[in-house]
Amino acid sequence: MRKILVTGALGQIGSELVLRLREVYGKDNIIASNRRIKEGHMNLIESGPFEIVDINNMDQMSKVVGKYKVDTIINLAAILSAKGEKDPSSCWNINMNGLINVLELGRAKDLQIFNPSSIAAFGSSTPPDKTPQDTIQRPTTMYGVTKVAGELLCDYYFKKYGVDTRGVRFPGLISYETLPGGGTTDYAVHIFYKAIQHKRYTSYIDKGTYMDMMYMPDALEAIIKLIEADPSRLEHRNAFNVTAMSFEPEELAASIRKHIPDFELDYDVDPVRQEIAESWPNSLDDSVAREEWDWNPKYDLDTMVKDMLEKLKDKLGEI
Ligand code: NAD
Ligand code: SER
């Protein structure tokens, strides 16, 4: 059975991925880690092994890999787009120097490495509609720079050292368990909290701004499917385009109104995040992932909205 170390496990993805992986591979085989304990995660921490690991601390990470005989690292520790623009040097340090540590461990101990990229790896010179798998990548955020460099670095470690690196370019992820950690697509999560609690949301992303999105259950299955994929079918390995839906704020609001008819949406656009959003694709072409490892998301806009509202109402204790 695999032994998987998940870094950054108390973030938006990790807090759900760890529990899903523990269902699939057994609770003792999934080592959750984060650089610090965060409030609200005692369930996860107590559901299996948990260690404090800072990916910028090679010694610490290496000891945990040795202690548990880890054979796979899913590296989720990172600084996302909006936070990265506030502190570009930390963004570079964690997303790049941390990743190099992960890859070096992969090389030394023959580990499989999953490292997610993002739609942020594209920029305004990228074809924005049905963005192809292989295309122009000139991002304008520090986060995007680290994501392109990370894709290349993972390719390099595979080609040069034979490290089994794999990854996808995730779109904005929508989930109800843990709030997003400071990205540009976060509006598409915050809107649900406000819709349930106040029937009103003020969006920092302008109407008409399309971005790719995905519901968390599909994102978790993408990770598991790709780490398990037959390597002989993988021509791209790292940075597969994956998407499940593309919408702009008015379309999301219209879908929410099918369940909360008096929901109101207005705008107070944040120029920084708006500029970032406009530099990203409107919609990705994910046909290569479908061909090479049978990627096939289950949720579209309406099924995601229905499930999100049900689950979040439960969580927030609303009827
Ligand atoms: P997040 O910000 O919610 O979580 C990141 C976690 O990493 C946090 O718990 C943080 O405490 C931890 N962390 C930060 N620095 C660390 C360090 N040096 N060592 C160890 N832990 C550290 O992020 P997320 O949304 O879960 O994203 C995980 C990965 O997926 C990132 O690489 C991100 O770029 C990518 N991704 C996420 C999305 C999304 O919408 N959530 C979209 C595209 C790509
Ligand atoms: N959700 C992420 C962000 O907005 C995309 O990588 O930063």
Image: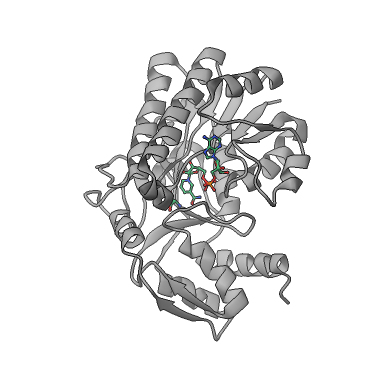
**At x 44% / y 47%, what residue is drawn?**
80
Q: How far across and how far down the image is residue 270, in percent?
A: 35, 65
**Residue 177 visible in rendering:** yes
Nearest to the observer: residue 89 or residue 216: 89
Q: Nearer the viewer, residue 276 or 214?
A: 276
Q: Residue furthest left?
A: 125
Count of numbered circles on the image: 0
Residue 70 visible, this angle = no
From this view, report whether residue 11 is shown above or below residue 35: below
Point out the image quarter for the N terminus: top right
Rendering coords of residue 36 (x, y %): 62, 39
Identify the residue at image location x=35%, y=72%: 207
Q: Is 119 on the left or on the right of 224, as rendered?
A: left
Residue 107 in the image, given as x and y percentages of width and height: 49, 16
- Residue at point 62% right, 22% down? 71
Give the image location of residue 113, x and y in percent: 52, 27
The residue located at (36%, 42%) in the rendering is 88
Looking at the image, which is closer to me, 128 or 60? 60
Residue 245: quadrant of the picture:
bottom left
**272 versus 31 height, above or below:** below
Identify the image's colour scheme: rainbow, by chain, secondary structure or one colour. Answer: one colour
Look at the image and tell me in which quarter the C terminus lies. bottom right
Q: Is residue 238 left or right of residue 222?
A: left
